Image (cartoon, helix red, strand yellow):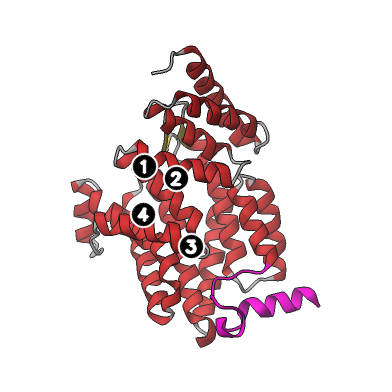
Amino acid sequence: MFLRVMALTLLLPASALAAHPLDLPVPLQGALETLRNGHYRQTLETSRSLQKTLPRHPLPALLAAEATWGLIFCQTGHITSREIWNEAENKTSSFDEEFFHAVEDAIAAGEAMQQKPPTSALGAFYDGLAYGVRARLYTLRKEVLKSAKDGKQMRASLLEAVAQVPALQADADAGLGVYNYYADVLSPFIKLVRFLLFIPGGDRQKGLQQLQAASQQAVLLAPEARHELAKIYSVRENRPAQALPLFRALADQYPENALYALSAAIQAERVGEKAVAADYARKALGRAKLMDDVCRSRLEPASQQALDRLQSTPER
């Protein structure tokens, strides 16, 4: 009976539930926190259970997609003691099948929700998130055409969600900000592809503003917006002093995720805060030992190398 009530609760109109349409029941909140703490396999197990009890809701499948994305990034992403970039060293992963299946499940559930007026806006919102996570993987692998098409659909779905329910604006800005920023700063070749595919242009400054707003005001996606903004500041904008407090906040909020701690260490070293850098490198090393094997194998040696370097060099 509890599971039936929870399933019905997720599909009722937002006005009948809570002050905000993205307020989540405890089981989904717990799964999201597990994901953010870098426990990807545990999140996958939880999401499979939630998909059985909530087969019509997109979020369990989205959690699975995000968890599998985390494993893919650990396995193939650019991770060293000095740099963490959204660029894949390999164009395939042993987790690909599970990732794409989860995305398709989330899209199907989102589209089904859109057919019912009470849940139409939420369906469009989750649909946009599903296209967004797949676009992120294509971007990681420099699959330009696929990334552009999914990015376009993400934008359209999020705009549709906000048009129906303006309260979704801050969370939609987490995706819209990414779109606006990257659509403006991409290479001329990619901009040409965008033009040929009739993909809307972007606005770098507006994208940054949207991500800043989402990082402070979003109900569901504030940590994700904060992480994306930190990555942009550190890699694209070369502003490590602005990236550092964002990464530190994430590392402190999610103390079991070595990726956040190592990112904070890297930015602290870049701005000359050696003591802070060594502290977060030490935290990253301890946390990496507790993560999934595929993440531990990449993050533990990178964290150790960062710590060894920081302990062997004099303070600036």
Q: Earlier in the sequence, mark 3 or mark 2?
A: 3
For disc 1, the marked residue is 242
Q: Earlier in the sequence, mark 4 or mark 3?
A: 3
For disc 3, the marked residue is 130
Q: Amino acid at mark 1?
A: Gln
Residue 297, numbered label: none
For disc 4, the marked residue is 147
Q: Earlier in the sequence, mark 4 or mark 2?
A: 4
Distance from Cα at disc 1 to Cα at disc 3: 29 Å
Q: Amino acid at mark 4?
A: Ser
For disc 2, the marked residue is 246
Mark 4 or mark 3, whichever is nearer to me = 3
Q: Earlier in the sequence, mark 4 or mark 1?
A: 4
SS at circle 4: helix
Dot 4 and dot 3 residues touching (CB under 8 Å): no
Residue 79, percent across and down?
47, 32
Image vertical order of residue 109 relative to residue 261, above or below: below
